[in-house]
Image: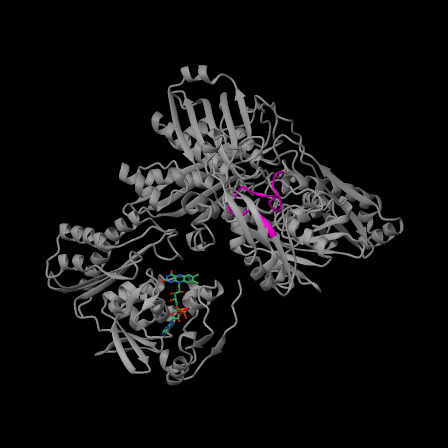
Amino acid sequence: MFVGESLERVDALEKVIGKGIFAGDLRMEGMAFGVIVRAERFHARIASIDASEAIATEGVVRVLTHKDIPGANGYGVLKKDQPYLAAGYIRFFGEPVAMVIAQNERIAREAALRMRVDYEDMEPLNDPFLAAASTVNIHKGGNLLCRKTVIKGDTKRAEGQSHVVIERTYSTRRVDHVFLECEAGLAFPDQSGRITVISSTQNIHYKQKEVSRLLSLPEERIRIIQAPTGGGFGGKLDVTVEGYAALAAYLTGRPVMVRYTREESMLSNTKRHPLYMNYRTGAAKDGRLTFLEAKITGDTGAYASYGEVVALRAAVHATGPYQVPNVHVESSMYFTNNPVCGAMRGFGIPQTAFAHESQMDLLAEALCIDPLEIRKINALRKGSETATGQVLNHSVGFYDALKCIEPAWKERKKTGNSGFGLGCMFYGIGNTGVPNPSACHLTLMPEGKIGFHLGACDIGQGSDTVLTQILLETLGLEKNCVLLVKGDSDTTRDAGSSSASRQTYITGKAVFEAGRKLRSYLEEKGIDKGRSLKDICSEASGEGGPIFDGFFDPPTTSLDPVTGQGIPYATYAFAAHMTEVEVDPATCVCRVKKVHAAHDVGRAINPDAVRGQIFGGVAMGIGFALMEEFIPSRSKSLYSYYIPTSMDMPAVETYLVEDQEPTGPYGAKGVGEPALIPQGASIMNAIRDATGIRGFELPCNFERLCLLAEKV
Amino acid sequence: MRLPHFEYAAPRSLDEALRLLAEAGEEARVMAGGTDLIVRMKHGLLKPGFVISLAEIEELRPISFDRRKGLSIGATARLAEVASHAEIKRRYPAVASAAEKTANVQVRNMGTVGGNICNAAPSADNAPTLIAMGAEAVIAGGKGKRSVPLDRFFKGPRLTALEPDEILTAIQVPVPPPYSGASYQHLSARGRVDISAVCVGAMTVFEGSTCREIRIALGAVGPKPLRALEAENLLKGQSWTADMIDSAGRKAAEEARPISDVRASAEYRRQMVDVLTRRAVLEARSMAGKRRR
Ligand SMILES: Cc1cc2nc3c(=O)[nH]c(=O)nc-3n(C[C@H](O)[C@H](O)[C@H](O)COP(=O)(O)OP(=O)(O)OC[C@H]3O[C@@H](n4cnc5c(N)ncnc54)[C@H](O)[C@@H]3O)c2cc1C
């Protein structure tokens, strides 16, 4: 009925006709604008801040520094170490120092340029290895943010029994999310003194907590509403403009808008972590993997953000979607004076996939086994054990995904300068080894509709549509029976963040649970015996209105702090990509021609939405592999930072594998991040096939490839 | 990023435009499609008090071909018009190709070849081919009309031979001689929809198997589009061998004066001048073979 149908997106019409009002376009009576003044220093002490000229500017309402913050001047998902406004110390290029609030945006921007800040520069640590060795501490506790380990079996003994051992080091660079819509938010106080923030965000309940700490107000005095959001990719998980807009509204008593230009967005937003990955992988003569030793070193930049999450995810996924009996992975994150690295689509796994997929091809080459064959030999399947000792009992569609692309792989024909490469991945859905529940509720509205209260943020990926489909399927009712009440901390429950590819699986299951409760209520009230929904609704609202809630927290266990053993995720997505590239041997310009992408999503609730994610993932993977590299102070805008355009898009053939997940709604898992993860790796293997050159450093742009070609 | 305040006029005749320009002096800026000017004004890099649009001046718009005088591209002819113009595609395919390879659809529908030339970015996509084909800038000003060969029109990054009171009215490209051919080659980090990291235009005229005339122009590898004169000399008057073409490529690379920036390193650029020069002259030669008249 609804599940498995490519329903039109519920938000399509309002976006197409321009009715959806994005946060940056909101206007309110008496609204002021806030602009952040940022340090253009890597590491420094603030000697003095002189705001006199800025304050004297006509139209300026107020200038704020850290001294004006009523509550805690620090935010962060795990560690609250990132100041909203620097308290005397600058740790990265772009760190906020002050905020100028003015009648309008032009005045605010002009006055911001009149702020005089003097600094005493300090030696910057711009590399994690330097940070590890340095006696200068960026934070009090030292430069090591965390070290995560996954240890299983005996890698030393396994090495002795291996036929080949391949050791290589891979590295990746910082990448910006470049969501279409830059950060924007409007905050305003109401008569009762509550502060409301409407912003472009991936999570509302988390931001409610952060703003409450910042203003030192109880959570119920803070209301966060999600505006239609033009992309996030993890970059709108941390507090962006919300804190500043709320602070300014609270202190001035008027509505305040903060919206970033692309330049400000690139200067301030978190980035994908650069990882340095030393891999030693062994295999037996028949191609079976014997062991993996990996040492992963990450640069988390100036503040913790999601650094710990990325370190842990990288460790847990270091093997790739393969059975490896002996594993020793050490994954460390260091603070540096680089931009803050945080959550970005895949949380470190696009990076590790580059390493493990290159290793698979190197092993295949050394053992004279076909690259697809060696993956099939080692593929995780039903009953396999992962590196963390988790036995996979269901929904392990990796082998099937490989079978999907096998015909294309076997029929591939190299012509001229073309080459073909494989890239595979597995990805745990939801947060790692911690509870990450989701809740929602349904109400009956007097006008005869079902109120669907949804705290999950649709950030363009289409969760509103997919979750509505799950609800309709469960209720067995018509589409227009449901009224979506969404993205508002006042009227919805905490559904967690739109991250970790978790909303379809986790919130979807919560929706399914709530839907089932409502379904049996409706049956009890005679919906199948000719009673109308409207009738039931009006009777129910007389009763005080029953509420049907849904809740789901995927079954996981915490991981052993030393060995990393445990059940980090209830389920995993799997994928295999095959990519064809063409490389001009003289200029080293690489074009991606064609991609075959097979994904085990459990169940495709909305097949077109799944394909949309895959296309987007391919595009982002091309950027990651071939052109994106954020260099602090040099990458300033899309003029100096490259992302692919539609002209760089190859043809993409998708294959949807549906090995249903019993704990998921109608068997669904997730695809948001998996869509991207194998793409970069498959491009690198294809370049090797086309040119005979293997790159170990991303992005592999024409310059890097040319340098490698010269060495050959 | 907002546009600062400025006065605006859209005169209907060239004379009026010239008069307004002369009166306003250094304060004023001429605008064709505005795709570069407006962006630079938004970024605060240019702050003209007065913008004179050429869009309403009928006489600056046409593209025309004359069997004796050759091709005339009016100053406000859009990049998209040049790229798709039947006569240009037939007689000057490299000119059409360079216009087609400039920027993206939106910019090509607004921006002009004239603006691309007056803008005088070292990487201007339309400059190398036009220089190679011996084009001239037709200029009108207070002191009357004059013509400047395009390879003397560029003076440096964003500097041209135009006096403050002058307007480019057209670009005049001579009739391609019999047995001539031209080519435009470019390269950029993104592949497409991007400012060129290196670009090369070449034009050759053959007499049998002998190259009677050749011009090679390099873009984005110096402060302005450059002629690769020594490379030309290696090929001029010769019946080309593979070795000769290789030496010409290397020579052009030596003549280039690239810098390192976000688009590419100087080393890579120099290497690519070699590659693209060889490709350009070879393609120009094969075009010459196909084009008898
Ligand atoms: C997104 C984007 C991508 C771009 N990509 C490319 C690219 O790939 N390659 C490339 O070469 N360029 C590129 N450009 C730059 C620009 O679009 C082109 O140079 C275009 O051809 C300029 O033409 P225009 O008519 O818009 O010029 P305008 O912006 O109108 O003018 C440019 C300059 O020339 C002067 N001028 C214009 N016409 C005259 C005249 N008749 N007489 C005297 N002075 C005059 C103006 O005063 C101004 O200084 C890009 C620009 C953008 C915004």
Q: Is residue B245 left or right of residue B89?
A: left
Q: Position of residue B157 (x, y in %)?
A: 33, 62
Q: Which residues are magenta?
A: A81-98
Q: Is residue A122 left or right of residue B159?
A: right
Instruction: Provide the major secondary structure of the magenta segment.
Output: loop
Q: Is residue A554 left or right of residue A623?
A: right
Q: Is any atom of residue A226 visible in this view?
A: no
Residue A95 is inside the magenta segment: yes
Which quarter of the picture shows residue B40? Answer: bottom left
In this view, B240 is above or below A514 = below
Residue shown at 47%/52% (left/top)? Answer: A636
- Camera-side residue: B47 or A60? A60
Q: Position of residue A548 (x, y in %)?
A: 79, 43
Residue shown at 46%/23% (left/top)? Answer: A293
Q: Position of residue A703 (x, y in %)?
A: 34, 45
- Camera-side residue: A312 or A380? A312
- Camera-side residue: A278 or A367? A278
Residue A48 is inside the magenta segment: no
Q: Is any atom of residue B99 visible in this view?
A: yes
Which quadrant of the frame does ligand 1 lie within?
bottom left
